[in-house]
Amino acid sequence: VEVGHNLDKVFKKLKYDKDEHFVIGGAEIYDYAIKYANKIYATVLYEKIDGDAHFPEVSDKYWVRDTASDIHVSKTGIVYSFLTYRRK
């Protein structure tokens, strides 16, 4: 694990790295980092969740969905699936 405190420097350093790297954010971090991403691993919840922080829109102008898992139901009744997107 490597921690970076300046996203511009981190992404510049990783630009030509062939390994996968993951951004663990909050909404502001995801919104900033999505422009650098080539792939998105997303968990989609199929219910309305109260809150004011959300993942940025994954626009089909820039992204194509690669995979979609079956729909799952958690032990607490939350319906979800896993999606992956790649940049066009």
Image (cartoon, rainbow, N blue to C red):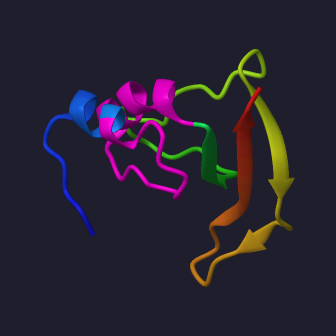
Q: Residue drawn at (69%, 62%), measured in percent from left and top?
A: 80
Q: In this picture, which residue range is highlighted in magenta?
A: 13-37
Q: Give residue 40's quadrant in the image.
A: top right
Task: Answer with left or right where residue 76 lies relative to residue 14.
Answer: right
Q: Residue drawn at (49%, 24%), measured in percent from left and top?
A: 35
Q: Residue 17's spot in the image, x, y percent? A: 47, 48
Screen quadrant of the N terminus: bottom left
Going by the picture, which residue comes out furthest to the bottom?
75
Q: Nearer the viewer, residue 77 or 61?
A: 61
Q: Residue 10's spot in the image, x, y percent? A: 27, 39
Task: Answer with left or right where residue 38 lies relative to residue 33.
Answer: right
Task: Answer with left or right where residue 2 lies relative to residue 64.
Answer: left
Q: Give residue 86's quadrant in the image.
A: top right
Q: Nearer the viewer, residue 47 or 21?
A: 21
Task: Answer with left or right where residue 8 lies relative to residue 78.
Answer: left
Identify whether 68 is placed above or below 13. Answer: below
Residue 5 part of the magenta-drawn span: no
Residue 28 part of the magenta-drawn span: yes
Q: Residue 44's spot in the image, x, y percent? A: 65, 52
Identify whether 59 is placed above or below 49. Answer: above
Q: Residue drawn at (53%, 36%), measured in percent from left and top?
A: 37
